[in-house]
Image (cartoon, helix red, strand yellow):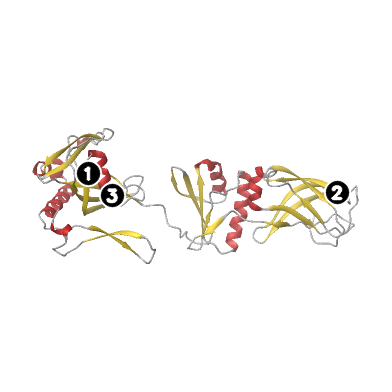
């Protein structure tokens, strides 16, 4: 059946038509969904199958035009929160009197709630997703067409764990996995032709080690409960991973406190190691921090640590694993050089850049011999 514009004329009361609900909009072309309807000069009713769900609609005539009014948002909530903003009201402009030809168009159609990012892309609002997966798939498809027409580039779709049923729908539309956290999965879609220019998932994990030495020239060391066979009996400095949004220096102080109960103060980053293909094929940055002890009494973390103690520096250095490992040996030699004031590490300085307006920690070496951090520990 063809749908187009005609002069408004009344239809036969007994005429039964098979028509299609035509979605015509500026970005997705036409979509045809079968509809059956009976019309009379005064009233008719029809049933619309949309996204696998049957809807009912009513129609009443008017001398110049008529409207088909679909249910309210409460009635069509199962189709997806009022079809994500679409007003299901259609204007019938008429028939030619000899055949059943109608032109239907939506009064208002919107796309998924989203906002633009600063790189010409779109970030979908995860709090305003359609409730029904079928409706979500339909509106997502139309949204992609709309964003493509607007010249958008990358699309970011964050799906909370409670909306996990939408993941396969998005994957079917061409979205790809970007990363996942405990509470969500992030999917992306690159619209332009050519290679995707969206940034990849985080490539590094960040670890820290706290080198704490007291006024008796003793190093704070631990033995972990879980270790590789080669590390049996090895006393090491407290180590761990930086938490999300945590500074390097606060992470070092926290880890030492958690594992040994010792309060410390950050002095400098002495050195850092960079290695690749560690956990889940990610790279690893490990920062060795010199810390000044503020307390002496050790309280062991029973979950991770088997034992902890203050160990004489000479005894610590003479351990076979340190003497046989070039990296461990070099790290300790740097720490000893720092204690002898023959080396200056990287101290933390808080600065604000006009580039992003954020407060940042800038780590750099201060060469002034009078600087407190470089002259003493």
* Residue annotated with mark 3: 250
Q: Quadrant of residue 229?
A: top left
For residue 310, above or below residue 89: above
Disc 2 versus disc 1: nearer the observer: 1
- Lower sequence index among marks 2 and 3: 2
Percent position (x, y) of residue 177? 48, 49
Using the image as rendered, state which of residue 80 and residue 318 is in the foreground. Answer: 80
* Residue annotated with mark 1: 263
Residue 148 visible, this angle: yes
- Lower sequence index among marks 3 and 1: 3
Percent position (x, y) of residue 260? 22, 39
Circle 2/circle 1 CB separation < 8 Å: no
Q: Quadrant of residue 309?
A: top left
Using the image as rendered, state which of residue 245 and residue 224 is in the foreground. Answer: 245
Using the image as rendered, state which of residue 296 and residue 61 is in the foreground. Answer: 296
Q: CA distance from mark 3 to mark 1?
A: 12 Å
Q: Tell me the element at label 3.
A: helix
Percent position (x, y) of residue 140? 59, 52
Q: Residue 300 got which mark?
A: none
Residue 38 visible, this angle: no
Q: Tell me the element at label 1.
A: loop
Q: Tell me the element at label 2.
A: strand
- Lower sequence index among marks 2 and 1: 2
Q: Residue 43 got which mark?
A: 2
Q: Residues within 10 Å of mark 2 (few under 14, many from 20)?
A: some
Q: Residues within 10 Å of mark 3 (few under 14, many from 20)?
A: some
């Amino acid at each position: 059946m063809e749908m187009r514009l005609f002069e408004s004329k009344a239809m036969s009361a007994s005429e039964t038509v098979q028509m299609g609900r035509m979605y015509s909009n500026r970005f997705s072309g036409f979509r045809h969904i079968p509809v059956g309807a009976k019309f009379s000069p005064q009233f008719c009713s029809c049933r619309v199958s949309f996204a696998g769900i049957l809807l009912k609609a009513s129609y009443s005539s008017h001398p110049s035009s008529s409207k088909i009014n679909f249910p309210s948002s409460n009635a069509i909530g199962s189709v997806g929160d009022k079809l994500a903003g679409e007003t299901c009201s259609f204007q019938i402009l008429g028939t030619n009197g000899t055949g059943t030809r109608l032109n239907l168009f939506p009064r208002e159609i919107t796309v998924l709630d989203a906002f633009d990012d600063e790189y010409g892309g779109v970030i979908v609002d995860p709090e305003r997703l359609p409730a029904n997966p079928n409706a979500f798939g339909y509106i997502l498809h139309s949204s992609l067409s709309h964003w493509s027409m607007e010249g958008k580039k990358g699309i970011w779709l964050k799906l909370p764990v409670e909306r996990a049923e939408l993941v396969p729908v998005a994957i079917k539309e061409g979205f790809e996995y970007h990363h996942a956290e405990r509470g969500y999965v992030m999917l992306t879609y690159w619209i332009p032709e050519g290679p995707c220019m969206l940034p990849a998932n985080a490539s590094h994990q960040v670890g820290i080690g706290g080198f704490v030495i007291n006024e008796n020239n003793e190093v704070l060391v631990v033995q972990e409960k879980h270790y590789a066979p080669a590390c049996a009996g090895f006393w090491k400095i407290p180590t761990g991973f930086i938490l999300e949004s945590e500074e390097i220096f606060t992470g070092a102080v926290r880890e030492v406190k958690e594992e040994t109960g010792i309060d410390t103060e950050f002095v400098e980053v002495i050195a850092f190691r960079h290695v690749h293909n560690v956990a889940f094929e990610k790279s690893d940055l490990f920062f060795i921090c010199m810390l000044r002890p503020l307390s002496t009494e050790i309280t062991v973390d029973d979950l991770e640590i088997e034992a902890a103690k203050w160990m004489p520096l000479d005894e610590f250095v003479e351990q076979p694993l340190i003497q046989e490992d070039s990296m461990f040996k070099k790290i300790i030699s740097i720490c000893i050089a720092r204690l002898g004031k023959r080396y200056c590490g990287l101290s933390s300085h808080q600065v604000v850049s006009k580039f992003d307006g954020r407060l940042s920690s800038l780590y750099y070496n201060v060469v002034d011999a009078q600087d407190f951090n470089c002259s003493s520990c």
